[in-house]
Image: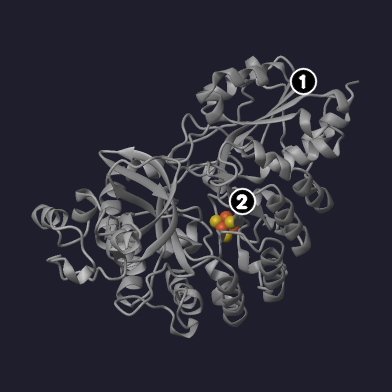
Amino acid sequence: MTDPETLSVTIVDGYVDEPAHFGVPPYISTYPRYAAGALVDAGVPRDQITYHTIDRLRDQPDYWRDVDEADLMIYLGGMTVPGKYVGGTPAEPDEVRKLAWTATGTSLMGGPVKFGVGDENAGATETERQDLDFDFVAKGDVEAAVHDLVDSGLEGFNNRMRDLDEVSRWAQQGAFIVEQHPNHPAHLICELETSRGCAYRCSFCTEPLYGNPEFRPPPTVVGEVDALSDYGVKHFRIGRQADILAYGGDGEAPNPDAVRQLYSGIREVAPDLETLHLDNMNPITIVNWPEKSREGIRIIAEHNTPGDTAAFGLESADPVVQEENNLNVTAEECFEAVRIVNEAAGWRPGEDPADAPTFGDGAPRRLPKLLPGINLLHGLKGEREETYERNRAFLQRVYDEGYMLRRINIRQVMAFDGTDMSDTGAEIAHDHKQLFKRYKKRVREEIDNPMLERVAPPGTVLPDVHLEYHQDGTTFGRQLGTYPLLVGVPGERELGRTIDVAVVDHGYRSVTGVPYPLDLNAASMNELTAIPGIGDSTAGDIVVNRPYESIADADLGTAFDLSQFVTTRSLESAD
Ligand code: SF4
């Protein structure tokens, strides 16, 4: 029998991406935090718990020693939606196997990895569950397995789900683990869980495998935020739920009072937070309960930080696909939900919420508080050529009728055991690969680009952009938050720093920005030529004729209104 007090434990985070849960850096999912809390609750001293991300093990191989020497090694990971990531690279099956082989103590694997492992983390793949040579695989909740395994002296556990009391306790007790994340403190965002499970049963989705939704009451989530703030976390996303509007209700209908308690409670315990975003919102809730939903959406927009996104799982605008895959929202209903979110929350800081949605010349140069995002999924049962046209036409209509979408996410299906899609597999996605490519390109060019210009017009200020990597002489970075815009800043700037940026140009899904405010007396040639209408020769003249006392003194030669983000500050401060 192993005494918990003497146990050394290493947690390795291989990252997760589920339909309603994200944990690739800069995000940390709930899994390592809950697992750490379960260990503490079972009697393991905090200072004997080590946490590593898979990227840290790759970058600093010496840390593999912690995997080797721990009495208990816990691997957490699993991707049940496909994706490409900037902030980290999820563990590949071979690396997970190496973890098991390296561990000389007991090894346990858990998280969504229990749903299956593909050959690679990509769309249009089929998956199967593999044990990857671990001693134990948690087929229920990994945090419950961790607790019971330690409790049994590392003998074993029964697969089970954790209950509400346990998760409330473990979420707070495990908050300390965030200090060991390589991104802590400034560049880390904590995914928060308000519920698991879903009242609906879409064919491709793993969320219903958790059953009907069970909500964590506001005080437990607020208590967790309080604990995380005590460990220096300033960025939060309420992303671990199928539908934030259904929070605290009967499973389907909204309960705005619960949403208010949650959001105002978080603001109270973390008054200095810098990001408060959400993830999923179900458009069918908005259509079925429009007034209560409007109220809930307004409450969210009062308390969140700008640039927030309510991701809508339309998945397909084709009624045939909707029918065959048990999708719960029609294109018409989704359009209605897009309209309501735009009206209730599409305002920008500094303006009257009643004016929403606003864009164009008169709108303040900040991102709107909350906008819908649209998820579209291809390769579903019943998909035909017409499906692609219907999806495109839906997006075009949103643009043409004057509404905004913060992002359009187009993916191909991954087929998981236990979901209705497992029989169909990835066959349709394979057959339609060329069609998919052409359509995606068209959406990017014809809708994403003008929509992005509407959402973030030139001059829009994006505070606190974290500079992440260099490519072709440009520095790329993102704000912390839900689906942040990728921002390219001319020149190679020091990475790891944070700067304020003003948008000057738009790609399909990214923007070009210059440091805000841009000082005419110090700006580089690259920065000046990034501004529309300023070519090499004008930029050269601007540089040669420095210094300027005011912007009016410079002959900028562009009709573009620069007054919103250009200054002559260095000269002014030199005076
Ligand atoms: S509504 Fe459908 S896609 Fe969304 S979480 Fe529920 S089952 Fe999954």
Query: Which dot marks residue 71?
Result: 1
Which part of the image, by quadrant, shows the C terminus?
bottom left
Judged from the image, the secondary structure of the residue bearing numbered disc 2 is strand
The amino acid beneath tag 1 is Asp
Image quadrant of ligand 1 equals bottom right
- Is 354 located above or below residue 51 in the figure? below
Residue extending furthest toward the front: 575
- Nearer the observer, 564 or 462: 564
Which part of the image, by quadrant, shows the N terminus?
top right
Q: Label 1 crowding class (10 Å Cα cut-off): few <14, some 14-19, many 20+?
A: some
Separation of marks 2 and 1 at Cα, in angstroms: 28 Å
Question: Is residue 247 in view?
Answer: no
The amino acid beneath tag 2 is Glu
Residue 318 quadrant:
bottom left
Q: Position of residue 545 (x, y in %)?
A: 13, 58
Labels 2 and 1: the sequence-earlier one:
1
Q: Which residue is mark 2?
A: 191
- Nearer the observer, 214 or 371: 371
